């Protein structure tokens, strides 16, 4: 009987290790924001912290791991340095699926973005420009930034339409 229990325990541990290694295990819970929320993520996500949404404050976004890109934009001079979180990391953290991300701005402007963009390019959700937190008057608090200087194929009008600023929500469909 004891041998059987030990074998079952080893099988269970092995299965749990396999689930963790393949990423099938349930994601770590998402804490509630400790300061004012700047982003709501909804739709096809598996990790939530407020009802059916994943809600983030800036500190939570920073905790996902920072990313930087230096790139020109149609709306700024020179090549500012943008800091934020890779949208691929954000997707991973909330367990996002689907083929489309709908970015919604504070003024309810909406743009559909293929999630393939976030996997193919290091697109960031920026919260800083040149070391300063983005303010609403400076296209903040969050701005989707494509690294167009590193990937010349991104310097198109179609891509520019996806540079949503004043992002308040992303819905995965």
Image (cartoon, rainbow, N blue to C red):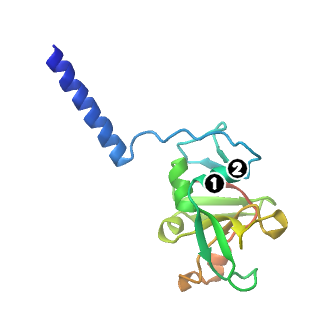
Q: Which residue is mark 1?
A: 61
Q: Does 27 sit above or below residue 106?
A: above
Where is residue 122 drawn, in percent x and y?
53, 70
Image quadrant assignment for residue 107: bottom right
Q: Quadrant of residue 139 in the image?
A: bottom right
Residue 96 visible in the picture: no
How many angstroms separate mark 1 from mark 2 (CA)?
7 Å
Element type at mark 1: helix
Q: In the visual, does 150 lie left or right of 38?
A: left
The kind of secondary structure element at disc 2 is loop
Q: Is residue 8 left or right of residue 132?
A: left
- Residue drawn where x is 72% and y is 82% of the image: 74
Q: Crowdedness of circle 1 by 10 Å Cα count: few (<14), some, many (20+)? A: many
Quadrant of the image containing the N terminus: top left
The local crowd at label 2, few if under 14, some if 14 to 19, many if 20 or more residues have their Cα within 10 Å, is some
Question: Circle 2 is placed at which residue position?
Answer: 57
Foreground residue, 22 or 131?
131
What residue is shown at x 74% (from left), y 48% (from top)? 37
């Amino acid at each position: 009987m004891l041998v059987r229990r030990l074998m079952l325990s080893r099988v269970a541990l092995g299965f749990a290790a396999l689930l963790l290694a393949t990423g099938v295990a349930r994601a770590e819970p998402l804490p509630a924001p400790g300061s004012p929320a700047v982003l709501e993520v909804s739709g096809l996500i598996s990790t939530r912290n407020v009802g059916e949404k994943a809600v983030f404050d800036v500190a939570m976004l920073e905790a996902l791991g920072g990313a930087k890109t230096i790139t020109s934009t149609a709306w700024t001079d020179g090549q500012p340095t943008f800091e934020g979180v890779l949208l691929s990391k954000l997707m991973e953290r909330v367990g996002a699926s689907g083929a489309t991300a709908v970015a919604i701005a504070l003024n309810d402007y909406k743009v559909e973005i293929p999630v393939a963009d976030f996997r193919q390019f290091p697109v960031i959700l920026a919260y800083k420009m040149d070391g300063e937190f983005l303010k609403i008057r400076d296209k903040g608090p969050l701005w989707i930034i494509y690294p167009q200087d590193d990937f010349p194929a991104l310097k198109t009008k179609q891509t520019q339409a996806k540079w949503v600023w004043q992002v308040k929500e992303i819905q995965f469909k």
